[in-house]
Amino acid sequence: MPSPQQARAQASAITSAGPPRRPRPPDVPAADAVRPAPALPGHRRIAQYLIEHLTEAAFLSITELADRVGVSQPSVTRFASAVGFSGYPALRERLQSIALGTRGGGAAEENHGNELQAAVDAEIENLENLRRDFADPGTVIDVGRKLAASTR
């Protein structure tokens, strides 16, 4: 699984790269072959949110993402298209593969199966860590008492 910094860098690359470059036909001027993604304020907010909250944002519906960023659902769809995806579902699928540490057929998939299996493997590891932490009930009770007594 990538580190948080690596995941943010990958998400940043997706959201700042613009549409993928396609070979231009010989009769099309180079300036018309690639249109950079528009730098609309709503698009910048969406990109920033995706970069800062990758693991959460990768699993949000279009409605949830739009609400959290403060833009409309069509703005999210236009953003996904502007950065080179067919729509929000394609963008979300790519963000999920980054968040889960896979690259669609890469080494992570070979070792952990598909993305869903990788997520289950991660949860199993989390539960095993929690089980180890609960081995000493006295420690858990002590932490609970300290939390209950705290003022925050």
Image: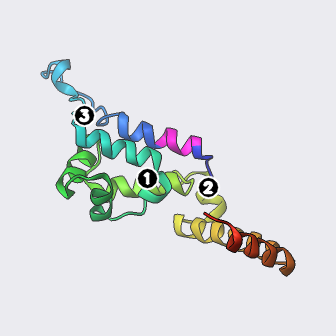
* Label 1, label 2: how far apart the Cα atoms are: 15 Å
* Label 3, label 1: how far apart the Cα atoms are: 18 Å
Position of residue 57 measured from the top left corner of the image (x, y, whole percent): 42, 57
Identify the secondary structure beneath mark 1: helix
Q: Quadrant of residue 14?
A: top left
Position of residue 75 measured from the top left corner of the image (x, y, whole percent): 20, 50
Residue position marked by numbered label 2 in the rendering: 108
Number of marks in the rendered image: 3
Q: Where does the C terminus fall, quadrant-wise?
A: bottom right
Position of residue 94 measured from the top left corner of the image (x, y, whole percent): 42, 53
Q: Residue at x 58, y 41 (%)?
A: 5
Residue position marked by numbered label 1 in the rendering: 95
Q: Residue at x 21, y 58 (%)?
A: 73
The front one of 121 and 28 is 121
* Label 2, label 3: how far apart the Cα atoms are: 31 Å
Which residues are the magenta region? 5-10
In magenta stretch: residue 6: yes
* Disc number for residue 37: 3
Say which amino acid is labelled 1: Leu
Position of residue 20 measured from the top left corner of the image (x, y, whole percent): 31, 36
**Mark 1 crowd level (few <14, some 14–19, many ≥20, 10 Å Cα):** many
Identify the secondary structure beneath mark 3: loop
Q: Residue at x 73, y 75 (%)?
A: 144
* Disc number for residue 47: none
List the single residue furthest toward the left.
Answer: 27
Main SS of the magenta part reads helix
In magenta stretch: residue 14: no
